[in-house]
Structures are given as C-alpha cells and as structure tokens.
Image: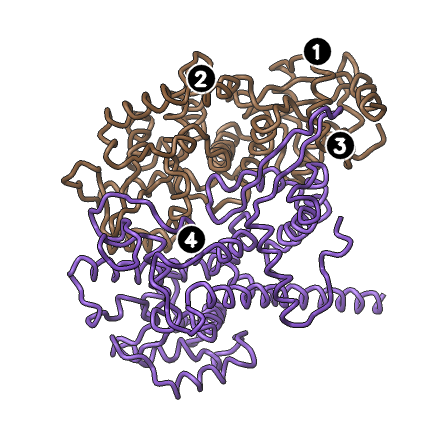
Amino acid sequence: MNNNYNIHDYLKYLELRTIFQMLLDELDDFDAVWRRSIFEEDGSQKFPGTVDYSDLLAWSKGNSISVDQSTISMGRSLMTLLADRLRNCLIKSDEGRLAMRHWDRRAGATLTDLEKEFSTEVIMSRKYAFKVNPKWFRIESILQELFIRNNIDLYWNDDTLIDNSVKREFARAFSDTTNVESRERMFISSFLKDNLDNGGHIRLSHENKNWDVYIRDRYGAPPGVFGVQEGNLEEGLTLGPKYLQADLHLAYGETISRKISWKNGKERGLNQYKARIKICDFATKHDGKIPLDAYYRIFFMHGAEHMADYYLTRSVGDRTAAEFQLHEVEGSDPKSWLVEVDPGLIRWRELHRDRRRERGDDEDEGKGSE
Amino acid sequence: MSRSRIIPRNHPSWDYSLWESIKSQRELMQQEDIDYIAQRDGTGSSNEDYWTTNGRKTPSGTVVDFIGLSSNFDNLDQAPNLRESIIEELERKATRIGGRKLLDFSDSDAWLEVNWPILAKVVGAAIASSGKEQDFWRTSGKDARQSHKFWGEMMRDGTLDKSGKGTYLEYENWQELVERFRQHGLDPSAAVLRGQSHLPSTPVIVEGNRYFQNPIAVDHRERMGDGWDSEGGPFHEHHGSLTFEVIRKATASLSNGKISDFLWAIHGLCAYHVMREEGLIQHKIGLHLVTNLAIRRNTRKVGCLPVPDIAKSLDTGFNLGPVLKILHDAGLIDWYTVDVSIVEAAIAELQNR
C-alpha cells in the first residue's frame, strides 16, 4: 500500500516537472520570438508599424487557453493594468498633454496600485500579527518572473530607473527560483514598499523590451508619426485600421500565471494544451487538416471532450484563439468532415521544433501522435 | 445496448447521419414527461435511470432521448444570402438609437454572426437563476446580477460625448469602476477587452482613453423596461425568466423572417452580459451544453444528439433533467425520443455502410 502511494507520488512529481518544463519553454519561446520580432538583428529597436507579429500571434494561439480560471487571472490582471497605464500615458503624450520626460508613477503601478488591483493588502491585519497575505507570494512570483524576463522595469521614484548594479542583484536573487514562499523572498514588494513615498513603481518595460511599440501597434497611433500605423490611440480620432488585432499581453500574462501555479498542482489548461499539440502534429503531416473524428478523439483522450466544440469557434470572441474551418468529405457515407487547422496554430508547434533544433534536442514529442 | 455511448466513441461525427436515419421515427417529448423527469432527476448528469445507453423506461417502451438546437433558429441559415438588407436594417436601428457614430459596420460577417460562446454563458446564467426560481437548486449565480450592477454604475459615472457617440468613462474613471468590482472578486476589465474581437457583442468600445458603452447594450437595457430595477431587486430575482423572454421574442422574430430584429436582440443580450469569466456552473450547463448543440447544428447541420452521450461528456454534478426542461420551456431546444431498438438498428446499419 505504502509502495503504491510512493509510486503515485513519484508519477505526480514527474508530471508536474513536465508541466513546469513545458511552461518554461513556452515563456522562453515568447521571449525569443519577441526579441527577433520587435528588435532589428543589430539590437536596435523597430518602429511601430514595421513589426511582423505573425510568430507572436502563433504563440498566442497555442497559449491562449479556453476557459479563464481563477489560477490564471492574476498574471492577466497585472498585464492588463500595466498595459492600460502605459497606453494612457502614450495617449496623453500624443495629445501634447504630457511630455514623455514628465512621465511618472502613473505610467506604471505602485504598491498601492497593486493592492487595489488585487483587492488585498500585502500585510494582513493586526489580528494575524502582520503576516504576509499568502496571495502576495504568488503576486511576487509573477513580478519576479516578469522582471527577470525584462518585461517590467523598477523605478526608485517617479522617473528614475534602478541602477544596473541593483538590477543585477535582483536578477541574481531570482536566478535560482522565482517561486516565493516566504516573506524573506518578497524582494520586489519590499522595494516598492520602501520607495512608496518617493513614487517607486513598476512599468511595462518600454526601456528594455519596447512594450510601447506593441501598445502602439495594438491600439493605434496618431497620423503623421514616422513608421507608426494610424489608429485610435489618440483621443477623438476616428477608428482606423489597427495593425495588430490580438491582445498578446493577456495571453502572456496567463502563461506566466500558469507557470507560477504549476507547483501547487493548480495549473489549468494542460489537457487543452496537450490536445492542441496532438492536433497540430497530425495536421502538419496531412496538409494542415485533421479528420473531425480524430479531432474529437484527441480531446476525449485528454479529458477535455466537453471543450472540443467550443474550441472550434472560440475565435469568434477571442482574436488570440485559433481559427478552424470544417470541410465535408465529398461522397462520404456516413458523412464525415475534415478540420482545417489555423496555420498560426501549426506555426506555434513549429516554433517548438525550432527550439528543439536550437537546443540540439533529438526528442520528437510529435512522434506517434496519430 | 451495453456500450458506453450511443454513438461509437471512434465515430463521434456519425451524429449527423444517425439523426438523419432515425428522425422520421422520432416522437415529440410531451410537456408532462419533461416536468416529471425534471422533478425526479436529482443525481447529476450521470443519472442511471434516465441518461443511460440502455434507454429510459417509459410506459410505452424503452426510449433514447435526443435534443437539438430549436428549429426556431432555422431561418438564421438565410442570413448570408440577405447580407445587404440585414446590414442596412441594423444600421437603421443603430441610427435610431443614436449609436451609428460609434458602431462600425464594415465587418458584416461579425454582424451576421451570433457570438454563441457568450450567448451560451448568458443562457447558463439564466438557467441558474431560473432553476432557483423553480426550486430545482439553491444557487442562482451572480453573473447577471453583477452585469446589471455594472451598467448602472457605468451609466451613473459616465460623461456624454459631445460628438454623439454616447456615454463614456475616461481611463481613470474606468479604472475606479473596475477596482470597485474587484473588491467583490469580479474583474470586468480583461473580459471586456477580449470582447473587442466581436464588436456587435462587446460590452464596451474603447477609443483612445475613452471607454464607451456599446449602444446596443444600452438599448437592450432600455428595452427591458419595467423588468429592471435600479436596486437590483426584481431583476435579481427574475433575470432568468426575463432573459428567456428576450430570447423567445428574438426567436419569434427570426421565425417570422425578421433576421435583423433577432440579431439586434441577441447582440444586445450578449453585450449586456459583462461578467464573462466567472461561474463554473454557468460554464458547465451553459457554455458547453449550448455551444455543443449550436456549433454542431451551425457548422454541420446536426439535428439532434443523444442525451446519454451529452450527459457523459459534460459529466457534471448539475441535474440535467431540470436544465433540459428550462431550455425546452425557453424554446431553445427541441426534445424528442426514439425507441431504443430503432436507434440500435440505425447504429448497426451505419457500421455496415
């Protein structure tokens, strides 16, 4: 009995390790694709309107999971807050109401903003002897993950970035793990608390990661800016053609959340994720199509049968989701259908293969997936 | 039948051919039988007495239950053929309510398309409420109640746009509104942003740092008239039946060939439903059940599906009998029975084709 229990535990551990590695790989893929999409080969930044987002869109089609769960909302909410704040400042700058040199904490989020965002305070009330609210361990983990991937910058005050030496210290502290389980590892929250009165805050990185380029491409920009697609970022401007139609930052925030949640066994969307991989592997070998029966079976085999139909049409309400087309097989009796898989989703799977080739990893996850 | 599914697991797409081969021998489910089952089905979707591949025993024999999206929706197939006239009519409606300046009709596909996943969530919320009203269960869900509250507060805090685009909130005010809802564990912001993908059913249209109410959602609120209460009283208690009333009227219009009236009402219903991320119950009984029926019908013309197979795939602790009764009474599904021997013979015949 005891042995069975241990084997079960060990298998669970192996599964969790697999989940962790998969999510780590996905986040690494995003960073790699972002780097080659948003930056020129020599490292200089691209202008809005010149970025090819196709691989980033492919990434989001693979990683945008079908049903939002409480365990993935934290990263999504945080990315929404930071993207909205940056966008708001860009709008004001475009309108001539706020010069960029005068941007302050309102371009990002202070500890107070985060406490409001998550409807809870870091330190719990007197009754609990000033213990840290356990929710903050996860928030801190997400912040650290965003920081080591250069997605957020830390500011001492309203307009001063932390020194590179301090940044390196933080990065060193996070290099072993971003998994926070004690008050002693709440580095970013402590930094924000210590510098709250000066205006210490975090921003979606427009200094190091060019998130401003994405914001402009996603939400538009005023006419007449070199290399910038005209859109509706400026207040009062008529809606123009937007350059990018998908909310990449939401899919990214959800994936960060999933990585943070893996250890407590609360990771959601794994079955859908595996089903997508199988569908792509099949479609890749069959001209981008998969028989409808095989499509349903894959969802069934991964315990997500009830999601299969919804996933077929999810793109109606979510542009980060994959699109599928159904084709009736001519002359089939009983009638049968082929599902044409979104090339973006297949490209997402190809990105996995690119990564494995770059790493010299021979293993082919897709083998035998039919 | 000693199998685990009516339709063999390896051939789920036989759903179309199975129904086509047996539909001429279907019997319409009688209201008294529906009421009887709803009162007695109390053990979740896997109830062995009703939703089994061996069939459900009735005084006249053993039958398998089949359900499908109501034939009330059949006229929707005509929408692509009448594209221009439907869009013109929708534009006229938008002009009539003063929403034309904000609504963009260039993507006509979006206007002709029902956002089924969101409609299914609306229906899920209404089922939860309606079931409580009828004493089938105690929980009523909080989606619709919160949506109603959200619109009340957005309306109250909003500024009227001088160019005639309607009421909006500046970014800072929007943030304050969102924060107030987060205090109660509900986050409308990300859901609203994601809704931008389907303009007709998005709750909020973002232009620069202005967050406009979708005029269709505002129109929906106004058309509900006396059914709504600023305190949330009557609405909170009856939003299930009110929602189904809107759907009934919309499908009646559709049956009479007024496709634009149907689309306008359904887009309004969806746009009004802000709380799209919450509610496991709503997901199970609304999202998955309704989308499964709607998507199979709309993409492959599948008429009806065997209820035992649906019950198996949903695998929910929620009682299916009352759910099906509510959906049936709302005119959303058609419910038939077919003698188990006919179903068995049809499956055998499909296997031999």
Q: Is residue A76 above or below residue B323?
A: below
Whether residue A13 sits left or right of residue A90 in the image: it is: right
Circle number at residue B259: none
Which numbered disc, 3 or 2, marks the residue that appears first in the sequence?
3
Query: Label 4, label 2: how many angstroms apart (C-alpha)?
Result: 34 Å
Query: Label 3, label 1: how many angstroms apart (C-alpha)?
Result: 27 Å
Colouring style: by chain
Q: Is residue A135 above or below residue B96?
A: below
Badge count: 4
Q: Secondary structure at mark 4?
A: loop
Circle number at residue B254: 2
Color used for chain A? purple
Which numbered disc, 1 or 2, marks the residue that appears first in the sequence?
1
- The x, y position of residue B170, in whole percent, is 22, 51
Whether residue A174 sits left or right of residue A283 in the image: it is: left
Categorize mark 4 by other alpha carbons within 10 Å: few (<14), some (14-19), many (20+): many
Circle number at residue B24: 1
Q: Looking at the picture, which amino acid does disc 3 mark?
A: Glu
Residue at x 48% of width, y 21% of height: B76
- The x, y position of residue A9, in whole percent, is 75, 67
Tell me which chain the residue with mark 3 is part of: B
Residue at x 23% of width, y 53% of height: A222
Query: Label 4, label 3: how many angstroms apart (C-alpha)?
Result: 45 Å
Q: Looking at the picture, which amino acid does disc 2 mark?
A: Leu
Can residue A101 be seen by looking at this rendering? Answer: yes
What residue is disc 4 on? A247
Is disc 3 in contact with disc 2, using a CB cutoff of under 8 Å?
no
Q: Looking at the picture, which amino acid does disc 1 mark?
A: Ser
Q: Are marks 1 and 4 on the same chain?
A: no
- Most distant residue in the front direction: A42
